[in-house]
Image (spheres, helix red, strand yellow):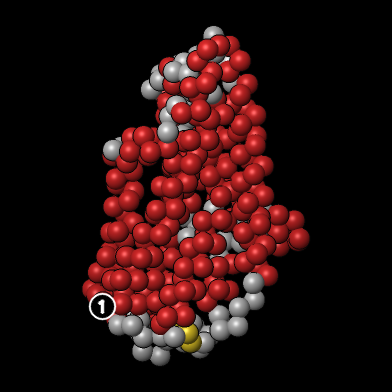
Amino acid sequence: MTGLEDHRLGPRQASTGTTLPVRIELLRQLRRRRTQITLALAVVLPVVLWIAFSVGNSSPPGAAGVSLTDLAQTSGPNFTVFALFSSASFLFVVVVALFFGDTVASEASWSSLRYLLAIPVPRVRLLRQKVIVAGILSASVLVLLPVVALALGTLVYGDGAYSSPTGESLPYGTAVLRLALVVVYLALYLGWVGGVATLLSVATDAPLGAVGGAVMVSILSQILDTIDALGSIRDALPTHYDFAWSDLLTLDVDAGEVVRGALSGLVWATAFGATAVWWFRRKDITS
């Protein structure tokens, strides 16, 4: 059984442009327990890190160099940077994969996908609306975690300057602005994860498979990126620019890696997203 095709909707075609509005879909997703838990995690993680610092031991006497952990306890911006380093390469990947991988696969697993298409909601519009909502929720986590970390870190450790392990320093106001740019970079760069998860979401009826598959792609890419024998091929890997955002926290910013990382994320997101649309338009909807 195939889903209703857009050109067969007849007189109801005019109403398809108003079906499944973003506001309704967003409210629907916000009521889900997994969304609430994920947003709560973004708030709780900085608190957990602060507690860990409070009960843990500092670097032993005579330890060489200054670590990010030591610097995290010197100011609000430093604490925020530590929270971002702790989250960027895995937690944020899982969050984006969760929201995007659940878009279509969850509807298929609940046997509600064909009924959504029969409202009628054109397939491309259905996918677009769900991707927009997934993007809003993912961006919310990317913003919420550093905002909470900055507020908590400033309250506990003060509004001092940001200090890097290399000895560079940025005034508090400048550091906050740079952190905002870091969040923008992560939102663009992690678009590739959303693209992979969306493609897997339309290719399978198992939400866990779509989410887990996107995370596994990220892990595999990170492993391949450590193999020096691959040479310049590694530059094309989606995870090659995982920490390019750290260049935004230097005194004299070299935006080369940052721009390449953002473009890489957008290119991969476009490629995977276009494939997802192509696949979904031709998919046999049986549930």
Between 85 and 181, the one lying in front of the other is 181
Q: Is residue 62 above or below residue 98?
A: below
Residue in the image at 61% along x and 46% along y: 269
Q: Is residue 202 above or below residue 9?
A: below
Residue in the image at 58% along x and 48% along y: 192
- Give the left or right position of residue 142, taking residue 202 as reference: left
Q: Quadrant of residue 279?
A: top right
User: What secondary structure is marked by label 1?
Assistant: helix
Residue 49 in picture, x, y percent from top left: 31, 67
Q: Dividing the image into 4 quarters, which one contains the N terminus?
A: top right
Query: Is residue 96 visible to the viewer in this orientation of the structure?
Result: yes
Query: Is residue 29 visible to the viewer in this orientation of the structure?
Result: no
Q: Is residue 62 above or below residue 95?
A: below
Between 83 and 52, the one lying in front of the other is 83
Total count of labels: 1
Residue 237 in picture, x, y percent from top left: 66, 53
Q: Amino acid at mark 1?
A: Val
Density class for disc 1 (Cα within 10 Å; few <14, some 14-19, many ≥20) is some
Residue 268 in picture, x, y percent from top left: 65, 47
For label 1, the residue is: 156
Residue in the image at 59% along x and 67% along y: 244
Residue in the image at 60% along x and 78% along y: 253
Between 100 and 7, the one lying in front of the other is 7
Residue 187 in picture, x, y percent from top left: 51, 56
Residue furthest out toward the bottom: 62
- Give the left or right position of residue 171, taking residue 258 as reference: left
